[in-house]
Amino acid sequence: MSKLHTEEFVVNMGPHHPSTHGVCRLMLTMDGERVVKIEPVIGYLHRAIEKMCENRTYVQCIPLMDRFEYVTSMSADMVFSLATEHLAEVEVPERAQYLRVIMLELNRIASHLIFYGVTAMDIGALTPFLYGLREREKIIDLFEMTCGNRLTYNYIRPGGVSKDIPPEFVPQCREVIKLIRSKLIDYEGLLNENPIWLARNKGVGVMPPELGISYGVSGPVLRASGVEYDIRRDDPYCIYDRFDFDVAVRHNGDCYDRYLVRLDEIKQSCRIIEQALDGLPEGEFKVKKINPFTFKPPAGETYARIENSRGEMGCYLVSDGTNKPFRVKLRGGSFNQLQALPYFGTGGLIADVVAIFASIDVILPEVDR
Amino acid sequence: MTRDDLKDYIASHFGDKLTALDTGRYDPLYELKAEHLVEVARALRDDENLKFDFLCNIGAVDTTEHFEAVYNLASTTKRLRLDFKVIMSHDNPEIDSVIDIWPGANWHEREMWELFGINIRNHPNLTRFLLPDEWDQGFPMRKDWDAPDFIRMPEPET
Amino acid sequence: MALIEKVPVYAEKIPGGSIVTTTLERVLSYGRATSLWYLLFGTACCAIELMCTGASRYDFDRLGMIFRASPRQSDLIIVAGTITKKMAPRLRRLYDQMAEPRYVIAMGGCTIKGGPFYYDSYAVEKGVDHIIPVDVHIPGCPPRPESLLEGCIHLQEKIKKQKLGDWHKKVRSYDQG
């Protein structure tokens, strides 16, 4: 009998798909049931944020940074403010530094809770979505109490933060941390030993650490492959060197480890927030001499980087001495992770591609800007 | 290795190719000539004391006189950072690809080509990816670009 | 003229015929309004608020709205997020694939007139009005879940007031004008 003639065909996981987080198009070349090649097509959310920043003052750019990374918009504001402060060489007051750390870590927990809910929903479990978002609402209440908005906060500005926290923030924050710690036990009990979860995630999408480093992958995706690289510890910014926390690392590099690393990170963030709340000093919350209308940092260029919940977020800022930035280049963690996806995501079924894509936690505006 | 040690090490080993521009602030900045790009990048990655294996970012800048491509590097094992920039002419900007050294440079260089018009030699796949497929209005991130439906924010009346 | 637009014309000629048409209108519009199934179409930041509105604290299910992944099974599209020039033809295609009668809610500032991306952006479609006909606009950046719920209730009121054939007249005037 002669061999059957087969050929490969292309399946389009189009820009509108319930499992691509945002508008990402994946062209999958299939050989029967197995995926042979993945080609991501992006650009469906390219909003020209970098061009817009060139015609706005420094403080007017902060709301644009919020929209660059809207799930963790405190981090996006932070990286731009950090770059501006490097250029202008201002010293941020102590109270503002502590408030920044508290807000950044709360935002990291909120982002990982969304990851928990949405990843489980992609695999097919609908209950964790409702649980994760219910806890996230308590964190959003804290943010709303401070800066008035639920999603795009516009809070961390060059020179400090925009407003001081009200007196009821600290006790409520402690209550929220206690609640999250107790609910994490429920979340782990729901999914960690679940046979369907293990069958869909264990051994799927293994990323070797050398591949990750050479493609610039960072964050929980790299730490799940065994590389212990965390910018909060290795290149500390904003008083992170004063806090005592562990870097969450796992060694297999598959989807299950990427999920476990993020749950570990929630626990470490709770530790950091408690230490920051205990040590919160009194004082100014922003530098007085920065006037938002006439702030002109000296000419120069710098690259500031922070550890976001998706990896390394960077901002390369060039100033020419006027009150508007000359060039802003933003770098998000998802850009490099999506670039590396074709090299570790193939060989499985389409359902495996869905599981891998959900576990690397890509946000499209970081990719397209 | 501290930042001063890094400065001295670079000056002794790469002093003829990397010229120091600004080494006092947070990230030391050097300038590199375009013809030495690939060999210096490979040496920086493979050097035993430096091991710059993580390419954070490649950014292109259009100062109106010339184009610059800025490379930001980091080391995952040695806790070091380095930036260097390559200057190209405004009329015909061209640069070599570093994709053999850091494969993560692939999409960064494609974006540089698409939005600024900088030609990348030896790149395997220079096609459109951020802008719509039927885009025919030039290179939008250049400072002298304009289009009929591009609405600029008006200056505030003081 | 669609067939459903001819029914009131003939029914009014029969004595007592308008009672049948008004009761039919009320039943049909009540049925459409209280069971709107929406298409999951979120591009940017407003999609997170849409997800939160469908989650535990602000529940969409109490208005009868369930999310569907396919346009063929839904009758409402909530356009949440910025629409760029590259995405616009895909949005039109999704709208064309939905079954009639279909409704559109434009959520957030970006879909109304470009939002924060009106000035200095070369790739954003400034408003979704010139791609698909919109029923309800909800301002905000992003709008709170309570605003989105209020917008859906406004849409339900609008549908309950519709008469037979109104929907076809509206779409024809959009396509011609």
Image (tube, coloured by chain):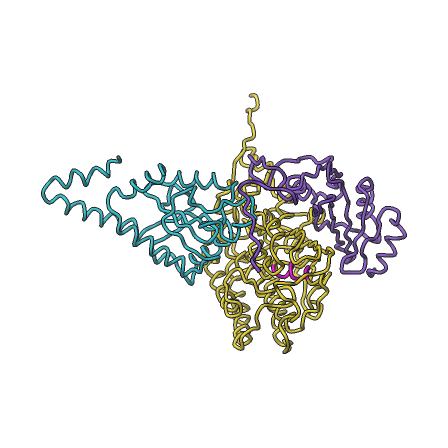
Chain colours: A yellow, B purple, C cyan
Q: Position of residue C81 (x, y in %)?
A: 48, 50
First to last magenta residue range:
A77-84
Residue A88 position (above or below residue A355): below
- In the depicted view, which residue is nearer to us: A320 or B37? A320
- The quadrant the C terminus of chain C occupies is top left
Residue that sits furthest to the front in the current view: B158
Identify the main secondary structure in magenta. helix
Residue A248 shows in this picture: yes
Residue at screen point 57% across, 35% down? A29
Residue A316 position (above or below residue A346): below
- In the depicted view, which residue is nearer to us: B8 or A277? B8
Residue at screen point 88% across, 47% down? B16
Residue A226 position (above or below residue A166): above
Q: Position of residue B38 (x, y in %)?
A: 80, 41
Residue at screen point 45% across, 42% down? C91
Q: Position of residue A216 (x, y in %)?
A: 69, 49
| Residue B123 in which image quadrant | top right
- The quadrant the N terminus of chain C occupies is top left
